[in-house]
Amino acid sequence: MHSSEHTAFQEWVQFSRQWLLYSAAFGFTDNYEKIMDGEYTNDILYGTFHQYSIEIMKKKVMGKYVYSDASILKLELAAQTIINSLLDKFVPAVLEYEEDDENYKQSKGERKLTDLISENYKRCYKSHKTDNDSYNLYLRLLLVTDFISGMTDSYAKNLYQALVGIY
């Protein structure tokens, strides 16, 4: 790719990134109530003004230039493995998590995992929990997803390696 083509492509990527963020923000705000009630089942871009343009871009442009590169595919698969493993470890640890409940006793493994979660996330959970068990379960799951999604790539990789014994 020549320098001018490379520059044009980089500018297009930047424009597309902003366009996708705007569309996702619109889709989120437009469906906020359904999302928060756990009733929204579509792609976040579904029903947005740019839905069809985005589908074309994903299928044609991204498929041809991005998703077909072997190194990117390997990186995506590794990232998926890391995220799935972290979710598989942390979700069970918080399913019944209640620090204030004297009847609740975590296993040693669950305690160690929840000790790794930032106190900021735990405080947020505690400040929003209610008397509704289902809603509190949702908040505990959100605690884990916020914790994991807030990790840098290198932190997630290092934590994954430490938890599975790869040093």
Image (spheres, rainbow, N blue to C red):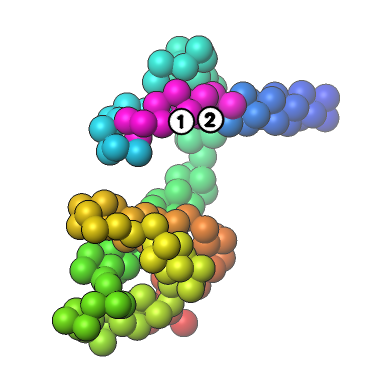
Magenta-span inclusion, residue 31: yes
Q: Which dot marks residue 28?
A: 1
Query: Between 99 and 47, which is closer to the camera in this rendering?
Result: 99
Mark 1, secondary structure of its residue: helix
Q: Is 66 drawn above or below residue 155 in the view shown?
A: above
Q: Which dot marks residue 25?
A: 2
User: Which residues fall within the magenta stretch?
Assistant: 22-35
Q: Is 144 drawn above or below residue 66 in the view shown?
A: below
Q: Residue at x 40, y 80 (%)?
A: 115
Q: Is residue 42 left or right of residue 24?
A: left
Q: Are marks 2 and 1 in contact (CB under 8 Å)?
A: yes
Amino acid type assigned to the residue bearing label 2 in the image: Ala
Q: Residue at x 52, y 48 (%)?
A: 71
Amino acid type assigned to the residue bearing label 1 in the image: Phe
Q: Is 88 drawn above or below residue 6 in the view shown?
A: below
Query: Between 132 and 80, which is closer to the camera in this rendering?
Result: 132
